[in-house]
Image: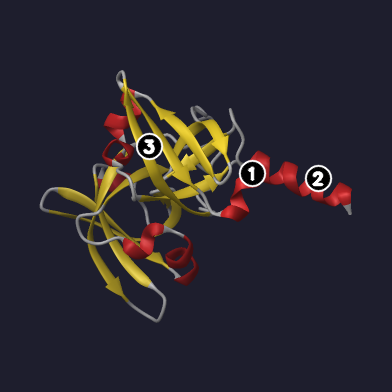
Amino acid sequence: MFTGIVTDIGEVVHVRPRAEGLHRLKIACGYERASIVEGASIACAGVCLTVVGVGEEDGRTWFGVDAATETLRLTTAGRWRPGTKINLERSLKLGDELGGHLVAGQADGIATVIARDALTEMARIALRTPAELVRYIAPKGSVALDGVSLTVNEVAGDTFSVLVIPHTLQVTTLGALAIGDEVNLEIDLMARYAARLLEARER
């Protein structure tokens, strides 16, 4: 589990297709080499991936992960190339502060930026979401965009908007978002469970 509070911005340095539908990714980061172990979970742009290798090169720590067919299909991981910057978050430990909201690192789909308005030291970003996910998104509810915990501002049809504060713009990749960019979207776990309970009651 994660909290949607980004702790580093990593950079994809190598992408190597392996078996059919499987990519091995090498990601450089600012974490200490000794703090990463094989088998650990790291949220990469909101996608929970398992560390399968770790090392150091040119003074930078790197870790390797495998992205399988479903991950490549449902997320932006299939578009990552050397130089792609991605938000990183280490998995939550018992006793850690829950600063954002509970995030599973299981992206539900891809949302597309359709507008970006510069406000005083903030940004309002509007996105279009896959139609099947609209029912889970509500004003004042939570979403994770590329692994960043955010509060929904407005919802209209298949679009929603978020307000992003200056700190978040500076320490995550959201500061570089432009119209047409795609981000990994994870809906709130509580919204998903509430919808399932309502479906069960209606049967």
Mark found first going from the N terminus, 2 or 3: 3
- Tally the marks: 3
- Look at the numbered discs 2 and 3 and tell me whether their residues touch, using CB distance below 8 Å: no
CA gap between label 2 and label 3 equals 33 Å
Mark found first going from the N terminus, 3 or 1: 3
The three-letter code of the residue at mark 2 reads: Leu
Query: Which residue is painted at 56% across and 46% down in the image?
Result: 158
Query: Which residue is painted at 34% across and 50% down in the image?
Result: 180
CA gap between label 3 and label 1 equals 23 Å
Q: Nearer the viewer, mark 3 or mark 1?
A: 1
Foreground of the two, 101 or 160: 160
Tell me the element at label 1. helix
Q: Mark on residue 6?
A: 3
Q: Mark on residue 45?
A: none
Residue 3 visible in the picture: no
- Residue 69 in the image, given as x and y percentages of width and height: 46, 71
Name the quarter where the C terminus is drawn. bottom right
User: Looking at the rendering, which quadrant does residue 130 occupy?
Assistant: bottom right
Foreground of the two, 21 or 143: 143
Tell me the residue that label 2 is attached to: 198
The three-letter code of the residue at mark 3 reads: Val
Foreground of the two, 22 or 54: 22
Crowding at mark 3 (Cα within 10 Å: few <14, some 14-19, many 20+): many
Tell me the residue that label 1 is attached to: 136
- Residue 182 in the image, given as x and y percentages of width and height: 38, 52
